[in-house]
Image (spheres, helix red, strand yellow):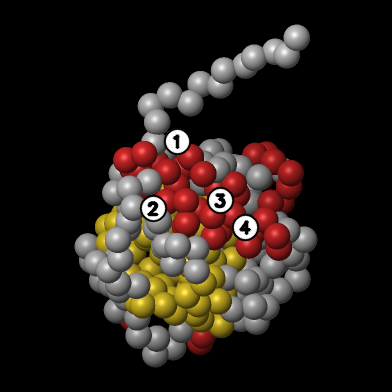
Amino acid sequence: MEIAALQINASSFEKIEHLTQGLKTDVLALPEVFEIGWYPEKFAVIDNGRTTNFLSNLAKKLNINIIGGSYITDGRNVCPVFNRNGEPVAQYDKMHLFRVDGEEKYIKPGKNPVMVELEGVKIGLTICYDIRFPEIYRAYAKAGADLFVNVAAWGAHKPVQWEVMTRSRAAENQIPLVALTQCGGQNLGHSRIIGRDGEILAEIKDDEGIIRAEIDFSKGTKFGILDDIQENYEVKYEKAC
């Protein structure tokens, strides 16, 4: 399966259509809150179906599965997924809210991880701050995920955390990861597609553009990380005399 990711600053629907014109791939991912940008004070604006209509039409026009970044609706930060026919097939509500910027003032947390199957590939969905919680990725791994996707609007002042955590989530589970964020202004950019050993398969720095990687999910040998998980990790505390 070929995976493509569109790195943009907050952009109009018209600009996204222009950037993706003629695109041929299997799955296209967009960043978190790709239309309005990371401005929590704007999260109270009612979407009224504009974003989902746009993404559905784009998927149908391009004949591409789309992981639609995220948009704000009904007090939720939602990642919608559409198949090649423009039909909605899944949505994930962001579980971990970024309190530092006050996201919890406008958004209700999602209750469950959501895994969607696109053309035989099982994809675990996450949004931005979720990357700091390895538990959700391990839950997807245990559920049989083939691929992780994290759509983000990651701050430019946190490059080390983005570098380390994106590669770690892939390597510690031996599952490829699409780590996509906005660029420009307060955003880091540096979107990447990461192989299951933590290697960078494709990356873009600061500019707007599309990255792609062909991933063969049938190749390679995993060495049984999930089989080696212990049932109990209760910490034994011994106080020195």
Asked if 149 appears above or below 201 in the picture, the reply is above
SS for dot 4: helix
The amino acid type found where label 1 is placed reads Lys
Sequence-first disc among 3 and 1: 1
Whichever of callouts 3 and 4 sits on the residue coming sooner in the sequence is: 3
The residue at the far front in this view is 241
Q: Are marks 3 and 1 in contact (CB under 8 Å)?
A: no
Q: Looking at numbered disc 3 in the image, what kind of residue is underneath it?
A: Ile
Residue 50 showing in the rendered view: no
Q: Which residue is mark 4?
A: 164
Q: CA distance from mark 3 to mark 4?
A: 10 Å
Badge 1 local density, few (<14 within 10 Å), some, or many (20+)? few
Gap between marks 4 and 2, in whole Å?
19 Å
Residue bearing mark 1: 111
Location of residue 239 in the rendering, given as x and y in whole percent from the top left corner: 70, 13
Q: Residues within 10 Å of mark 4 (few under 14, many from 20)?
A: few
**Quick one: which residue is furthest to the left in this view?**
120
The residue that label 2 is drawn on is: 124
Task: Tell me the amino acid under the disc marked 4.
Answer: Val
**Considering only order in the chain, which callout, 1 or 2, is on the residue closer to the N terminus?**
1
In the image shown, does 29 or 160 lie closer to the viewer? 160
Of tags 4 and 1, the one toward the viewer is: 4
Disc 3: which residue: 131
| Earlier-in-chain disc, 2 versus 3 | 2
Left or right position of 148 against 72: left
Residue at the location (51% across, 72% down)? Answer: 200
Question: Residue 20: where, in percent of width, then height?
Answer: 46, 84
